Amino acid sequence: MTTQPTTPDPAAATAPMVQIEGLHKLFGDLHVLRGVDLTVQPGAVSVILGPSGSGKSTLLRCINELEEIDAGSVEVAGERMGYREVTRRGRTRLHRLHPKVVARQRSRIGMVFQRFNLFPHRTALENVMEAPVQVRGDSRSTARARALELLDRVGLSDRADHYPAQLSGGQQQRVAIARALAMDPELMLFDEPTSALDPELVGEVLGVMQDLARSGMTMVVVTHEIGFAREVADQVVFMDEGVIVEQGAPEQVLVTPREQRTQDFLAHVL
């Protein structure tokens, strides 16, 4: 019997990698995110700018389910993150998914933080191997081979046996990027990855991120590096006081911003 080839679903091919609608997050009386809507297409780089306290990092943590949301929805690759809707007696409520399901969802997303958070008692190689072995159950030989590939990709093949204390800040952050990539994520989140680095080390980390962007990795990057946003971003998002004030192509938001608040911010950072 001849098997007919399946026809790709055009809708699936064009579905957003990240779809956020009406997202609210509160910490007690502090309303940090106030109805955020954001779409990130597959393979695109979205850079989020804004002053401290504007909700940028909280937004990333909600995407990665490190924070529970108070209202709205977050979808990654068409899957609702963290919650399911349950309708009873005509009322629809959100119910938190089982922690194992949340962990499985989170494993599809890589995240790189301001601080490197490497295990100090493990080498660079062991840090990169850890999650595939412990979380995904890869054999140590498979994880080792993949970790060596990733360390080479971030320019650290000669530092595989070094401990974090023997590495510069830029090298530690590159190990952290390799560690995030070791789980083969569909989406990478970066939370001000260069803010803790000395100025002369920033370029080596941004270079790795540029290579990732060129490879087609979908990325959401919180940063103050305007040059990176100008050169690499497909979309620039400016946030303030928990809302998206303005978003669009880099040449629009960074060169001819429409909103006065965006203009004021850029006047201070450029």
Image: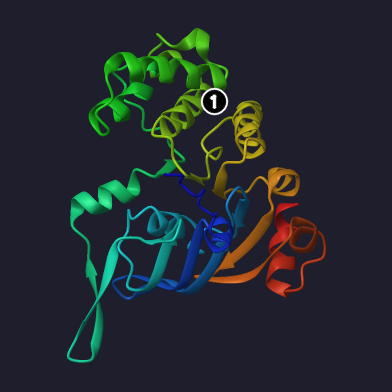
Left or right of residue 10, residue 125 in this image: left
Please name the residue shown 34% across and 22% down the image.
Answer: 129
Tell me the quadrant of the picture where the N terminus can be found. Answer: top left
Q: Position of residue 12 (x, y in %)?
A: 52, 59
> Is the residue 225 above or below the residue 98 in the image?
above
Residue ID for mark 1: 170
Does any portion of residue 165 appear in the rendered image? no
Residue in the foreground of this view, choosing between 173 and 16 = 16
Residue in the foreground of this view, choosing between 39 and 8 = 8
Q: Position of residue 6 (x, y in %)?
A: 50, 52
Please name the residue shown 34% across and 48% down the image.
Answer: 106
> Is the residue 175 above or below the residue 210 in the image?
above
Does any portion of residue 84 appear in the rendered image? yes
Please name the residue shown 56% across and 47% down the image.
Answer: 218
Q: Amino acid at mark 1?
A: Gly
> Is the residue 66 above or below the residue 216 in the image?
below
